[in-house]
Image (cartoon, helix red, strand yellow):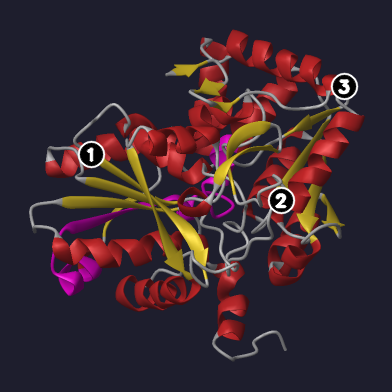
């Protein structure tokens, strides 16, 4: 059962006392304004006239014909302004920050798309912006670092820990705890202490609200399966949200298996994780027997997170959603496949979902349908994928 901030045994607020009051203020303000006409009109106006929504609902004819099974539809979040689904949530949280009188936004980022989106809206709203990014991710996502700085954001490379996404979140939470009255922390995924998982789901649910309407207009029925990649889980929870009550629609989240879920080089949290507390929430994490977070690995900077949002852990427990792993090699092959079959350079995060669609579509009937969310575009990944294949394009 979902209660405020709780998903059965998951969720909650596990943060220093100094943050409880501020988080409660965020939750109270959000609950007071989220259903008002003023907030909804401003949010929807920015989604439609700035972020380029509704996003395209694309029939992947070449993939469908090549795989020989279910019809494949792609929800094209990669065509949003800034190139990913992240802009949906950032617009909502930045509007909330504005209502609260905040002048500075802070955020974590892994692949860089959330950092770019936050810097974009900060520029639009005339706010200051500080982005925390693991030093390793600043190297493999140099393009997005430059984009953030071009937009006026300040990038802070994080050199502690594994120097990746989890460490960026640590740094952002430390900044938030040090200056709770001054800054607004724009959490990028459906993770963290309440009310972030709830807010992120609400703001990202536009993905599934649109796709449900779009597929009904084309097929006159709901999809058989909805597939989306999962790191922390904002893209997937947005893709699932309006279908959770539709019991005949299968929901499939695709995690980063890295070199394999049975190796130490993985980010397959739901398959291999155990219950713990980290980053302000109780959820599933890749951790040792003492509760210390394990190093994780994925070719994808956006999916190499050692935990998952509490609602995903809940959906897995009640068997409402299925979670599977895709390896680096499978994701890279899908990166090449969708480029050649559909002329789409998709984010390596999204290609984990595409790889799983390739596995299941041929086993389905031709009258069945799959919706796969393309969470972002792959410009940011081209150099890294080329390097993975032994080609240096940096020079």
Q: Label 1, on which residue? A: 249
Label 2: element kind: helix
Extreme-right residue of the structure:
178
The tag earlier along the polypeptide, 3 or 2, is: 2
* 75 up-or-down from 99: above or below: below
At x 22%, y 42%, the residue is 215
Q: Quadrant of the N terminus?
A: top left
Measured Cα–Cα span from mark 3 to mark 2: 24 Å
Whether residue 167 appears in this view of the structure is yes
Q: Nearer the viewer, mark 2 or mark 1?
A: 2
Number of residues whose C-alpha sits closer than 10 Å to that of mark 1, classed few (under 14), some (14–19) or many (20 or more): some
Quadrant of the rendered image containing residue 31 = top right
* First to last magenta residue range: 62-89
State yes or no: residue 75 in magenta. Answer: yes
Number of residues whose C-alpha sits closer than 10 Å to that of mark 3, classed few (under 14), some (14–19) or many (20 or more): some
Q: Nearer the viewer, mark 3 or mark 2?
A: 2
The tag earlier along the polypeptide, 3 or 1, is: 3
The tag earlier along the polypeptide, 2 or 1, is: 2
Q: Label 2, on which residue? A: 166
Q: Are marks 2 and 1 in contact (CB under 8 Å)?
A: no
Number of residues whose C-alpha sits closer than 10 Å to that of mark 2, classed few (under 14), some (14–19) or many (20 or more): many
Q: Which mark is residue 181?
A: 3
Q: Is residue 166 left or right of residue 78?
A: right
């Amino acid at each position: 059962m979902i209660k405020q901030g709780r998903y059965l045994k998951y969720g909650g607020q596990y943060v220093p006392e100094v943050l409880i009051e501020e988080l409660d203020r965020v939750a109270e303000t959000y609950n007071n304004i989220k259903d008002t006409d003023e907030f909804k009109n401003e949010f929807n106006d920015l989604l439609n006239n700035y972020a380029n929504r509704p996003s395209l609902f694309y029939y992947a004819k070449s993939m469908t014909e090549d795989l020989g099974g279910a019809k494949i539809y792609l929800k094209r979040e990669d065509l949003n302004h800034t190139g990913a689904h992240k802009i949906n949530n950032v617009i909502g949280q930045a509007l909330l920050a504005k209502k609260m009188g905040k002048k500075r936004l802070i955020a974590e980022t892994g692949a860089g798309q959330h950092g770019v989106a936050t810097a974009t809206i900060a520029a639009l709203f005339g706010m200051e912006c500080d982005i925390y990014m693991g030093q390793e991710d600043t190297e493999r996502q140099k393009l997005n670092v430059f984009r953030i700085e071009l937009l006026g954001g300040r990038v802070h490379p994080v050199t502690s820990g594994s120097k990746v996404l989890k460490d960026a979140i640590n740094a952002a939470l430390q900044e938030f705890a040090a200056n709770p009255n001054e800054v607004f922390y724009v959490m990028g995924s459906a993770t963290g202490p309440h009310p972030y998982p709830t807010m992120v789901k609400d703001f990202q649910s536009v993905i599934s609200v649109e796709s449900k309407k779009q597929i009904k207009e084309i097929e006159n029925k709901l999809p058989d399966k909805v597939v989306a990649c999962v790191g922390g889980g904002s893209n997937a929870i947005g893709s699932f949200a309006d279908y959770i009550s539709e019991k005949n629609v299968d929901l499939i989240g695709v995690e980063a298996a890295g070199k394999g879920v049975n190796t130490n080089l993985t980010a397959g949290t739901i398959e291999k994780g155990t219950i713990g507390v980290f980053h302000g929430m109780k959820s599933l994490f890749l951790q040792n027997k003492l509760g210390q977070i394990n190093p994780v690995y994925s070719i994808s900077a956006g999916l190499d997170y050692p935990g998952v949002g509490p609602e995903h852990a809940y959906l897995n427990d009640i068997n409402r959603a299925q979670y599977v792993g895709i390896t680096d090699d499978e994701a890279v092959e899908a990166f090449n496949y969708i480029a050649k079959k559909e002329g789409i350079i998709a984010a390596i995060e999204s290609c984990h979902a595409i790889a799983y669609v390739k596995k299941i579509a041929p086993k389905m009937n031709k009258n069945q349908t799959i919706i796969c969310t393309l969470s972002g575009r792959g410009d940011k990944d081209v150099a890294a994928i080329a390097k993975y294949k032994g080609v240096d394009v940096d020079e």
